Image: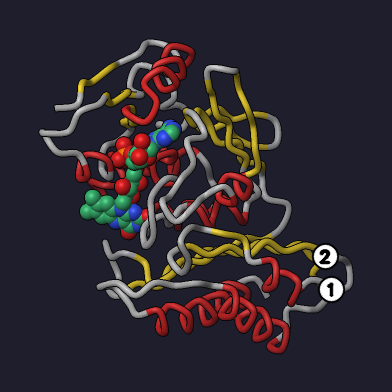
Amino acid sequence: MPELLRPASVDEAAGLFASHGAAAAILAGGTGLLRETHPSDDGVLIALDRLGLDRVESRDGGWSVGAAVSLSGLRAAVPIPALQAATREIGGPAVQNMATVGGNLFARAPFGDLAPALLALGARLVFASADGEEEQPIEAFYAGWSEDGAPRAGLLTRIEIDEPAGAVSYLKCARRRYASPSVVSVAASVEKDGSGAVSDARIALSGASAHPFRCAAAEQAVIGAGLDDAAMAAAGAAAEAAVTPATDPVASDWYRRRMAGVFVRRALAALA
Ligand SMILES: Cc1cc2nc3c(=O)[nH]c(=O)nc-3n(C[C@H](O)[C@H](O)[C@H](O)COP(=O)(O)OP(=O)(O)OC[C@H]3O[C@@H](n4cnc5c(N)ncnc54)[C@H](O)[C@@H]3O)c2cc1C
């Protein structure tokens, strides 16, 4: 049975994570980790429940979200409709009350429905390690993933979210309306200049590749254009070409690829 450790400070938790190496796992809401943990396992679980990471602080121009804030807590505290929509799409109410913002960012495909919203919002992740604190853009975190999942980046302590400069949309394609894993989930944010042309865009997907990612080719298809049918179709086609979907009991790779294109078009149409 893994030993449960409950450090009382972030420094202590980061030290334990470093000293136990690969034998340590961080226990947040436990909705993912405990399903994978067997009584015969060795190692240690480092709980986050005494670290004060379950709070959202409103700051000038945005929010600092503790990594152990629940998905329903995020929805209540940060009034960005696309982000709130993403939290509603993750499991049912019980999962949303237990699962944390930080934990969902480590979920493997087809889970990980919060990430596209945070990628589209340009969120930044703050990690604590034995060497101190490090902040990185969320896309840099996912760029470091391998086929085996997340790198050992340290203890994620908070997520910095700025008020969006433009409009943001979020959509999930699933087999059932509620409590269903993703075929694909998509978020888009666009800023427009005075003429209505797109001056900046962020388009992100989850579920259709090994990890969530920003789709640069889809973004380039709309930047400089108006959000017309041709630009949205080009962005959808670019997303279809960029994803590397898997076949699993939820969907075939063929269907996921098609839905990636369809849902990128729809996410952009919601902002047109
Ligand atoms: C019934 C059910 C339905 C679900 N449906 C969906 C769905 O529709 N969409 C979806 O996206 N997900 C879904 N999930 C998965 C669920 O959202 C994730 O398991 C959950 O978000 C993980 O968060 P957690 O706080 O429970 O993390 P935990 O289970 O505690 O941890 C998960 C992983 O993240 C790591 N971790 C957690 N916090 C940190 C941190 N602060 N720093 C570093 N590492 C950390 C842990 O070490 C572990 O490897 C579902 C799960 C269940 C049980």
Question: Which residue is pictured at 38% across the width and 54% down the height?
Answer: 108
Q: Residue furthest right?
A: 194
Queried on whether the Cβ of the residue with tag 2 lies below 8 angstroms from ligand 1, the answer reads no
Residue 100 in sight:
no
Mark 1: which amino acid?
A: Gly
Residue 245 in sight:
yes
Question: Within the image, what quadrant is residue 131 found in?
Answer: top right
* Residue 223 screen position, x and y as percent: 79, 71
Q: Residue furthest left?
A: 39
Query: According to the image, label 1 marks what residue?
Result: 224
Badge number at residue 199:
2
Mark 2: which amino acid?
A: Ser
Queried on whether the Cβ of the residue with tag 1 lies below 8 angstroms from ligand 1, the answer reads no
| 231 versus 58 height, above or below | below
* Residue 148 screen position, x and y as percent: 41, 51
Q: Residue furthest bottom?
A: 230
Image side of residue 240 versus residue 95, left or right: right
Question: Which residue is pictured at 49% across the width and 31% down the height?
Answer: 156
Which one is nearer the viewer's eye here, 9 or 228? Answer: 9
Question: Within the image, what quadrant is residue 72 found in?
Answer: top left
Helix, strand or loop under label 2: strand
